[in-house]
Each structure stands twice: as structure tokens, then as C-alpha cells.
Image (cartoon, helix red, strand yellow):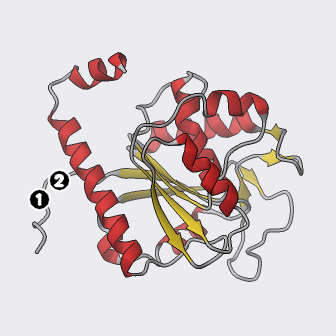
Amino acid sequence: MGSLPQQNQRKPRFLCLHGFRTSAKIMKTQIGKWPESVLEKMDLVFVDAPFPSQGKSDVEGIFDPPYYEWFQSNKEWTKHTNFEECLACIEDYMLKLGPFDGLIGFSQGSILSAALPGLQNKGLALTKVPKIKCLIIIGGAKFRCPSIVENAYASKNDFPSLHFLGETDFLKPHGIKLLETFVDPVVIHHPKGHTVPRLDEKSMEIMNNFLDNIQENLRSDDELPTGEEETEEAMV
């Protein structure tokens, strides 16, 4: 029998970045399929990408518009438009709605989420907000643009990360490659494709353990004397 949650215990706060040509409302519905026992352990904030969809959305007929996209890319995914504007938008959300402990991303939002910590460490993004401490990546991949790659993945991320890999997801090989950019990634395998999956019993156990570990890390951080956390970060 697990221990009862403390009344004053702070939940990890996540900024949720939705998929390509979807929306905050759609992602809230997608993640809302997860059991309440999981959802109650997180403080989730859903936001829309800055740009209205510039083409047909794959979710038309499933979810209602409007649809948004974080940035635009060429077919090879080697060049991006409005990427700097996208980074500024996310930082603005974090300043207005934060502070945040981590990010949850799906599809285009997950590719962004996995790259942001490295860009932040290089001083190229999110310079006005606290360091990202944890990630949940659903249907993720790495950027291919050389200028982003050399900075976003310059060193491995040494913080808790949870990665969803779908058996029939077209991005699965890229999601596996993304794991190499993390020191100790936790993985949930599911039988579906490029989607936010429901959680079976095994997945729920993995996710609950992951969230419990984050909770413990946050409690330890919150108990540090003022200034000690910054000192430890500076020594890394």
C-alpha cells in the first residue's frame, strides 16, 4: 500500500506543446484519456502554437478547428521558418504562466520539447526562465537542421525523461535515435501509431514511478537552502 500524498506537496508543473496543426484544446483531450490517478500527479498547462495552420490538418474530421503550428519546415526538415519566433512565444508563455518544471510534447511539440533543454543550456532559448528539469516526449524525433542539431544535442540531457514509442509510429526509428541524447531515458512502448496512447497497466506503472521520482526530486530541490540549487547548477 503506497503512502498517502502530502496535502502541501507541490505537483510538477508541465507546459504542454501540442502536435503539428492541432491545438491546446485537442492535446488536452488527447492527454485526458489517461487515468485520473496519473493526471492528478501533474499540473498541466496547455497552450496554442503561435501560427495558424498553413495547410490541411491530419486531424480534420476527428477534432474541430482551429488548428495551429509551431513553425514551418521544408520537406526534408532541414530548414525552418519562424523558428526564432516560436522560441520567443514559448518563453513568453513560460514567463506568463510559469514557473514550469518540465515540458510535455507530442509530435512537432515533442521534437521542440526535446531540443529546448540543449538550446537553453547554450543560451540560445529560454534564457529568462528556470532550467527545464524533466520531459515527457510522445512521438518524438531529432531536428535535422544543422544549426539546431549542433546546439540542441551538444551534450546529453541528465534529467528525468519519459519517452513514448509507438510500434507502428512512422517516427519510431527517430524516437529511438532521440533516446541517445539522454543519460537515462525511461521508455513506454505501446502498440499504436503516431498518437497519444491510452495507458495500459504496465504503462501506468512506469509512468507513476516516473512521476513519483520527479516529485521526490522537486521536494529535495524545494528543501535546499536559498542559493544552494543555483550553486549546484553552476558547478555542473
Residue 70 pos. (x, y %): 70, 49
Q: Which of 64 and 190 is in front in this view?
A: 190
Q: Which of 143 and 5 is in front in this view?
A: 143
Q: Name the residue under label 2.
A: 9
Instruction: Kindly identify the amino acid type of the residue bearing the numbered disc 1.
Output: Gln
Work out which quarter of the rendered image holds the N terminus and state it: bottom left
Side of 107 where 199 appears, left or right: left
Quarter residue 65 falls in: bottom right
Side of 214 where 55 appears, left or right: right
Rate crowding at label 1 as few (under 14), some (14 to 19) or many (20 or more) other CA atoms within 10 Å.
few
Work out which quarter of the rendered image holds the C terminus and state it: top left
**On screen, residue 74 above or below 124:** below
Query: Residue at the spot x=26%, y=26% of the render?
Result: 229
Rate crowding at label 2 as few (under 14), some (14 to 19) or many (20 or more) other CA atoms within 10 Å.
few
Q: Name the residue under label 1.
A: 6
Residue 38 pos. (x, y %): 33, 70
Query: Residue at the spot x=62%, y=39% of the render?
Result: 89
Q: What element carries label 1?
A: loop
Residue 221 pos. (x, y %): 22, 36
Q: Report, in whole angstroms, how far the alpha carbon at label 1 lies from the one at label 2.
A: 5 Å
Query: Residue at the spot x=33%, y=76% of the render?
Result: 36
Quarter residue 52 falls in: bottom right
| Count of numbered circles on the image | 2
Is mark 1 in CB contact (under 8 Å) with mark 2? yes
**On screen, residue 59 above or below 147:** below
